[in-house]
Image (cartoon, grey):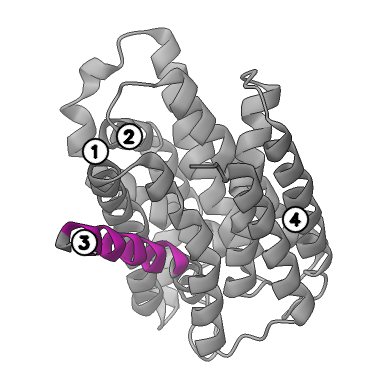
């Protein structure tokens, strides 16, 4: 393996670690290590979106000319809110009562919904292999949802379904980027999409009384630190490195990071004293098998 290939794999695993640790950061933005509540789930999401959109706003302002039609504007709205805004709130809501590692497992369903949406909404044809992979993948999603009943804390099916809805939002955003914003650099798409969420994020940050937490909770600085790292590392840096990886390799290689995220999330969860059942791990393996079958191609 040559030096450039080692660099590609290095970027791959760095991205997997960054995005796989996002669930851990969400958890400790809401609770201290001792389990003391700090910020609410909605407050953490508003902090994450406000920090990320603020950092990316200067980039967006330099690329406003990309929005040259009403169609592009609406598509960027879909990408901004389905790809970032709504999932930020759904994931933190789910993690009020679910383990971070288990949420990371559920996130692996994103590729399954991505293919389904591309077929039903954008009319992309499916091969027999893809259909077989989807059947296996959806079976795994159902098993993983069933495995989430009473995971830890006070987990319920509603919390589990919140993660599933977030993955559907991600899948929707990915398809709109692919079929409606083709040819526009990913960094420009990301910065402009985030800029459209700046005002809603700022409004919710204030409306949810987030600033009051700093004067009322002695652990606010600690929680804000984790939320800021989540925004800067999981969103801003993650997007940048992902663009670098795409430029250096192929979209297939870069998108494969999704497969590594659940494993990283689970390992971090174990280190954070979370427990997993054999049924959950089996369901995850079923999902990953379905994704592999759907994407596998003969040389």
Q: Is residue 57 left or right of residue 286?
A: left
Residue in the image at 65% along x and 22% along y = 125
Foreground label between 1 and 3 = 3
Q: Identify the element where label 3 is drawn.
A: helix
The reply to whether the C-beta atoms of the residues labelled 1 and 3 are less than 8 Å apart is no
Compared to 151, does 261 lie above or below?
Answer: above
Whole-number angstrom distance, CA of label 1 to CA of label 2: 6 Å
Task: Identify the residue under disc 2.
Answer: 195
Q: Nearer the viewer, residue 25 or 297?
A: 297
Q: Quadrant of residue 154?
A: bottom right
Q: Position of residue 215 (x, y in %)?
A: 38, 73
Q: Position of residue 282 (x, y in %)?
A: 74, 71
**Secondary structure of the magenta portion, mostly?**
helix
Q: Identify the element where label 4 is drawn.
A: helix
Q: Quadrant of the N terminus?
A: bottom left
Labels 1 and 2: the sequence-earlier one: 1
Labels 4 and 1: the sequence-earlier one: 1
Labels 4 and 2: the sequence-earlier one: 4
Residue in the image at 56% along x and 76% along y = 266
Q: Quadrant of residue 216?
A: bottom left
* Magenta-colored span: 4-20
Whole-number angstrom distance, CA of label 4 to CA of label 3: 33 Å
Q: Is residue 197 left or right of residue 67?
A: right
Residue in the image at 54% along x and 37% along y = 82
Q: Which disc, if any, is residue 147?
A: none
The reply to whether the C-beta atoms of the residues labelled 4 and 2 are less than 8 Å apart is no
Binning the other alpha carbons within 10 Å of mark 1 as few (below 14), some (14 to 19) or many (20 upward) gives some
Task: Identify the residue under disc 1.
Answer: 57
Task: Identify the residue under disc 3.
Answer: 7
Q: Which disc, if any, is residue 141?
A: 4
């Amino acid at each position: 393996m040559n030096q450039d290939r080692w660099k590609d794999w290095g970027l791959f695993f760095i991205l997997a670690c960054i995005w796989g640790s996002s669930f851990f950061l969400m958890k400790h933005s809401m609770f201290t290590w001792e389990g003391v509540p700090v910020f609410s789930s909605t407050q953490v999401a508003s902090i994450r979106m406000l920090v990320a959109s603020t950092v990316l706003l200067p980039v967006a302002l330099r690329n406003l000319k990309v929005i040259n039609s009403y169609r592009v504007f609406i598509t960027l709205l879909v990408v901004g809110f389905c790809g970032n805004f709504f999932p930020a709130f759904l994931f933190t809501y789910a993690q009020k009562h679910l383990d971070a590692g288990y949420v990371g497992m559920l996130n692996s369903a994103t590729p399954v919904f991505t293919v389904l949406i591309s077929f039903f909404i954008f009319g992309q044809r499916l091969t027999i292999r893809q259909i077989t992979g989807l059947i296996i993948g959806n079976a795994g999603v159902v098993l993983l949802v069933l495995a989430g009943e009473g995971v830890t804390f006070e987990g319920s099916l509603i919390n589990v379904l919140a993660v599933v809805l977030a993955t559907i939002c991600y899948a929707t955003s990915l398809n709109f980027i692919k079929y409606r914003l083709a040819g526009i650099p990913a960094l420009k798409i990301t910065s402009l999409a985030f800029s459209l969420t700046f005002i809603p994020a700022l409004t919710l940050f204030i409306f949810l009384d987030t600033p009051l937490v700093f004067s009322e909770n002695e652990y606010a600085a600690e929680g804000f630190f984790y939320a800021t790292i989540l925004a800067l590392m999981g969103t801003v840096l993650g997007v940048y490195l992902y663009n670098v990886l795409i430029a250096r390799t192929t979209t297939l290689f870069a998108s494969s990071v999704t497969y590594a995220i659940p494993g990283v999330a689970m390992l971090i969860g174990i280190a954070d004293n979370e427990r997993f059942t054999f049924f959950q791990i089996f369901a995850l393996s079923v999902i990953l098998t379905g994704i592999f079958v759907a994407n596998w191609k003969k040389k």
